[in-house]
Structures are given as structure tokens and as C-alpha cells.
Amino acid sequence: MALVEFDLTTEHLEACPWRQVIETCAVPDCYDYSHALYRRATQPDTSPSDRAALQFLAAITSPLLTPDRPTPFSPAVILPTGRSSLPEDMDARETDLLAWVAEHAADPDLKARAADFAWHLKRDHRLGRLAVDAYFRSAEKLEGVQRWRPASVRITRGVEIAASLGKNGEPFREAFARLEQLAQRSDEHSPDVLTLDLMETLLDYRVQDPQKWATLAAERAQRCEQAKNTNFARMFWRLASKWFARSKDATRARETLLRLAETHVADANLAEGRSVMVAIHHLESAVEAFRRVGDTRDRIRAVRDRIDELRPKMLPELKRTTVSVDTAEMTTAARDHVSGKQFLDALMSLGLGMHPIRKSKLRDQTLSLAKQFPFQALVPTVVMDSSGRPIGRRGGLLGLLSGDPAQDETALEKEMFKNAVFEHSVRAGGVIEPARDVISSEHPCLDRDLMPIVSENPFVPPDRIHLFIRGLSAGLHGDFVAATHILVPQVENALRYVLAMNRVSVTRLVEGIEDVLPLDSLLALPETVAIFGDDAIFELRAVLTERFGSNLRNRVAHGLVSEHEFFGHEGRYLWWLVLHFCCVPIAARRRTATEPSTGPGTDPSNIGGADESG
């Protein structure tokens, strides 16, 4: 294998105008050189030998220098069909040419790269020493154009090579002394990023006085704090803690971590006047930082108290995003579907007029949306309650875009619950409320009129019939405060009742105490899915238990739903879902009595196309 298909010699390299090409580059590093060399190689007036020489030099300058990884070089480009060049792609003839480039290149970065390749491939100590010196000179040149990170990478690589030549040898002692000298500078040539990198590099080696470096890092952190550069202050405080730990000074190591945590509080102080939301973010970071230090309960409590004070002030900053959905046709169809019918027939038509959201279809739609709007899919999402508290998080959906959704099943399911809530709002506003309004207007009913819906119903426990009637009646009359408070716990009990009737255990024994299974556990049982179906269980989770869903069961139980929220889509959709579960067995009995069975795939009538939603 070879980088170029040409019998390249040192004479070809000497005759090639690569030196002039490099001199035109604004930034004196191999990354810029490789692009310039490739451009010159593709010009039509370039001779075959010059083209080969330019391509060879472009190939050895294109790899990225990555001294923090197991291999010091990584390809600049990686494609499904291959990658750009690396040192191991060179054949023996090209490897021999590296020594010539290292010795004849005046530019320190190209000299360092060629010598490093030769050291990497042939372990030529002479070229290794040449690479060390060239890397330090290249770093100095890069500092001159304020390319701080490339400069620190070259210093780090130079020290690595010197160490591999032997830590007891003169090259390493000289390189390490130069590293220490550069790391402790405090003039305009020592910006925070460069000094931080060099001090981090020092940590990889044994030093005689770690307390000295701990003190220098702490002083640098204080300077950054005074300049309100808290990001670098945190990094220097963390670095100081490492150095104090290296010197076995646990007390000062802890003190520096406390100082680090306080920088988040300082950020919150600065941000509060501009954005309460950003201030809360910094305070939450402070809580996490204090927790990691340990034994900081009082400070954490004080920070949490401040977060609680700020949360109500954050709500005006939240921007509401609305999506317009034309439900006119759906609303008309829903009204027509129940209008003019007898009371029970109208109620059954509403209960059976929609199928619960089809989980498989919702999954496909969620995947399609993730690919249609990849940025939204990649960005992690936080859900907040009405007071602005973060109550749920999902990671990015990177696997959805890479063709491997299995990587993100948990995040995908959370996104599905979020999309289900949107679908619930459409159904509640476009179908459920218009149909309920028609029924309640055409049929002033009493509670006893609902008895045929719930009596002798396999979903309704015999001792809970009147509770179901009161809940359904309250919803039918628009009182979703009462309906929700009654129906939420009764649904949970109804699940236990149905499972028990099917000889499924709904309790667990812990240390001699027998407790009923909580709702989450009931919904997770395979027997529950087998009895009710995957779609219905997904809907129950979305409405009752999931943080990315409506989470009504937990929010109602803990008093977290305000009065006006009960009259939103969540209460209406819960009411309809309970009505649906009550109507399904009645419809099944009617079908059995009046017509041949059409199998489990048969759906009830569909209101305004709502069966195809989700």
C-alpha cells in the first residue's frame, strides 16, 4: 500500500514547489498545509512528478494530531467507504522519504510531522529527538498567531515523544523543563486555555512539588473569577483540587471543590437580572457540585431555597409554542355522529367512536418526525410542570438518525408519550368536547341513566358501580374536577379487579407484609397487556403515569393540578378513555348476540377519521 501511485524520489521532492505553497498559508500548521498542497496538486499545469510530490506531502499533513488518544494521529475524513490517510498507509519507500522531509523542511510544523511519522513507524531516535524540538518551535510559532489549542497539542506531543525516548534521558529532561517553564508563565503569552492544557499535561508526569502547581492553579482560578470568566475558573479550581490531592492535602483539595461549586452561584447572581431561567440552571449546577463534594447539606438547602424563590419568576420567560390544527371537519363529524340518537346509543357512539392511539403508528410517526426535524431530535428535552420545575428529561435521539433506533428506545418512548399528549389535545377539542356538548344538551340525564353502562360490566368492580356513575356523570356535565378525582383511582382499582378475575396476582409480599401492586407495576405486567392490548396500556400510561405524558395519577394524588388545568384536554381525555373501556365489553356482547364474530381486529365506528390518528 502507498499514499501515491508514483515512483517518488527525493529528487522529485527537491524539485517540487511545496515550500512556496506552504509559505502562502496564513496559519502555520499542517492542517492548512494539506488543503493548500491538495489544491496545488489538482491544478492542470502541475507536472506528474510535482503532483505526486504534492499529494504525498498533503497526505502526511492531513492527519489530525490527537495526543490525548491511544494513537497520536486520526484521519481527517471518515466516510462509509473509507478514510483519509494515516502513517500506516505508507509503504517502505515512502517511509524512507520522511527522513528527507524532516531534515530539509524549514517550517517547524512540517518538520515535526515528518519526523514524528518516522519515529512512529521506524522508532528512529534521531528523528524522534528532531520531532521534539520541532514541536516546541512550532508551538511558539502558533502562539504568535494566537492558535493556543494547536500550540498546546504540539507541546503535549513533544513531551510524549521525549518520554518515549526514555524518561531518564536528556531529551525528556529538557522537554519537561520547557513544559514547566511554559506552564507557569503569567504574561500575555499565557492565555487561560494554553496554561490549563499545559498544567493538565504536567499531571500525567511526576513532578517534584505538586503543592506549587496546586497553588498556581488556584491563583489562576482566582484571576479568572475576578475577570468573571467562571468557566475557566471552574476548570482551574478542579485542576487545583487534583494537584492538592496529588500532594495529599485533602483539606485544600476539598476547599477548591467548594470554590468551584460557588462559581455556579456567582453565575446565577450575574444571570438573574437577565434571565431567571438561566440563573436557576446555574443554581441547579451548584447543587450538583456541592453534592459531589459531600457533607454540604446546609449549603445545598440554602441554594434549593433560592431556586424555589426564583421558580415563580421564571414562568413569564417561557415562550409558548402553538400549533394550529383545523378541527372544523372533525368537530362537525363528531356532533353529527351522536346527534339525534337515544341517550345510551349516543353515549356508546362517543365511547366507541375512536380507537385508543395506535402505538405502532405513533412510533412510525415519531420516527418520521425525528428524521424530518433532526435538530429537535438530537437536542435533549426537559419537561416542566406548571410551576416551572423540571420533572422529566429525555436524551437526544441520535440512533434514530443513524438508522439504529434500538440505541434510543427509552428516549423514543418518551417522545412518543409527548406526541400522544398532543394527539389527546386534538381529540379532546375536536371530538370529545363537541360530542359531549351535544349529548348533554339533547339529554338532560340523571345519574341512574348511566347504570346500563356500568352495571354488570367486567371492567367495573361491583362495589364501585356508583363511583363510576358519579365520575362519568360529572364529566358528562362538564365537571372535570370531580370526574378526574373520582375516576383516576377507580381506573387503577379496576385494573387490579380485572387481573384478579383472570387469576393474576396483584399483590406482593415483602418481609411478611402483603401490599397491592402500584399502578406502574400493574401496567407493566404481561398479563395486563394480553388482556387490554398494547394500545390501551400505552394510553393508560400516557394519561396516568408517564412524566412525558399527562401523569394525571401522580399529579392529582399530590395536589399538583390547578383548578383550571382539570378543564383542559387531560381531564376530558381521561373521562373519554374510561367511557371507552366501559363501552367495549357492551359492544362485544351486542356483536356476539346479533352478528357473527369478525375477529379481534374489528374496530368500532370512527368519528371524523380519529381512528387513524396517532
Image (cartoon, grey):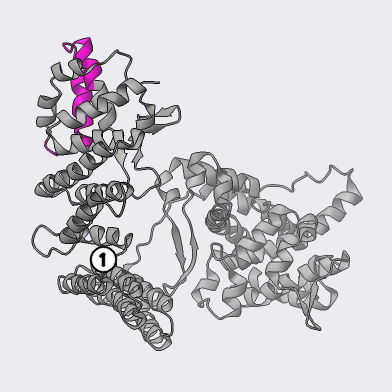
Q: Is residue 467 above or below residue 196?
A: below
What residue is shown with label 1?
Answer: 231
Please tell me whether the stretch drawn in magenta is mainly helix, strand or loop. Answer: helix
Queried whether the magenta region covers residue 36, the answer comes back as yes
Total marks shown come to 1
Name the residue at 58% across, 51% down: 409
- Does residue 227 appear left or right of residue 86 in this picture? left
Whether residue 445 is visible to the viewer of this picture, yes or no, is: no
- Does residue 265 appear left or right of residue 541 in this picture? left
Name the residue at 26% across, 24% down: 97
Q: Is residue 114 above or below residue 567?
A: above
Q: Which residue is at the front of the view, 102 or 430? A: 102
Name the residue at 19% across, 19% down: 13
State which region is magenta: 26-54
Q: Give the residue type at disc 1.
A: Asn
The quadrant of the rendering that contains the N terminus is top left
